[in-house]
Image (spheres, grey):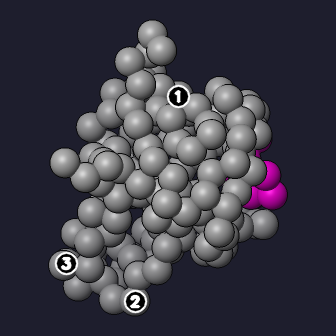
Amino acid sequence: MNKAKVLSINISKKKGEMKEPLSEGNFITDFGLEGDAHAGKWHRQVSLLAQESIDIMTAMGAEGLCFGNFAENITTQGIKLHEIPVGKIIRIGETLHEVTQIGKECHADQGCAVARQVGKCIMPTQGIFTKVIKGGIIRIGDDIEIMDNQD
């Protein structure tokens, strides 16, 4: 079985902008990715989306998708993020995160650019959100592990 890995760390300085990839990010306890517009003391500090979910959108006809296009902070591979229950702890690199939400509402009237292109967006059903419970650095290639919540 392949291990789950971090493919990309993505950041935006302002809300509503596409995120730009970084080689590593500093994730701050009870805050999120340092410098990211969505970080703060709330339940959606960090957003994650699996490459496998992005591949579904590509198969539906979405073109030119890059890391960060869905405003995800972390793009993963080898893990079904949307199947991780809320409350579970996941280790990503040096950090620990608590899953706080699965999916989200898409932009109200028109949907995101991807939804306008292919009629649907995957983030509302397959993206997840976490709260940072132990901060540290996350780098491209870091392992991702679902914890037992007793570790």
Q: Secondary structure at mark 3?
A: loop
What amino acid is at disc 1? Answer: Glu
- Dot 1, crowdedness within 10 Å: few (<14), some or many (≥20)? many
The span from disc 2 to disc 3 (Cα, nearest Å) is: 12 Å
Q: Is residue 20 visible?
A: yes
Proximity of marks 1 and 3: CB atoms separated by less than 8 Å = no
> Where residue 68 sits in the image (x, y, percent)?
53, 70
What amino acid is at disc 3? Answer: Met
Proximity of marks 1 and 2: CB atoms separated by less than 8 Å = no
The mark closer to the camera, 1 or 2, is 1
Q: Earlier in the sequence, mark 1 or mark 2?
A: 2
The span from disc 1 to disc 2 (Cα, nearest Å) is: 31 Å
Q: Residue at x 76, y 40 (%)?
A: 28
Question: What residue does disc 3 label?
Answer: 60
Q: Where 48 falls versus 28 (above or below)? A: below
Frontmost residue, 143 versus 125: 143
Q: Earlier in the sequence, mark 1 or mark 3?
A: 3
Where are the magenta residues, as a range? 33-40
Q: Secondary structure at mark 2?
A: loop
Q: Residue at x 39, y 77 (%)?
A: 114
The mark closer to the camera, 2 or 3, is 2
Residue 59: which disc? none
Magenta-drawn stretch, dominant element (helix, strand or loop): loop
> Where residue 102 sits in the image (x, y, percent)?
39, 39
Frontmost residue, 94 versus 81: 94
Proximity of marks 2 and 3: CB atoms separated by less than 8 Å = no
Q: Quadrant of residue 131?
A: top right
Residue 64: which disc? 2
Residue 98: which disc? 1
Q: How many marks?
A: 3
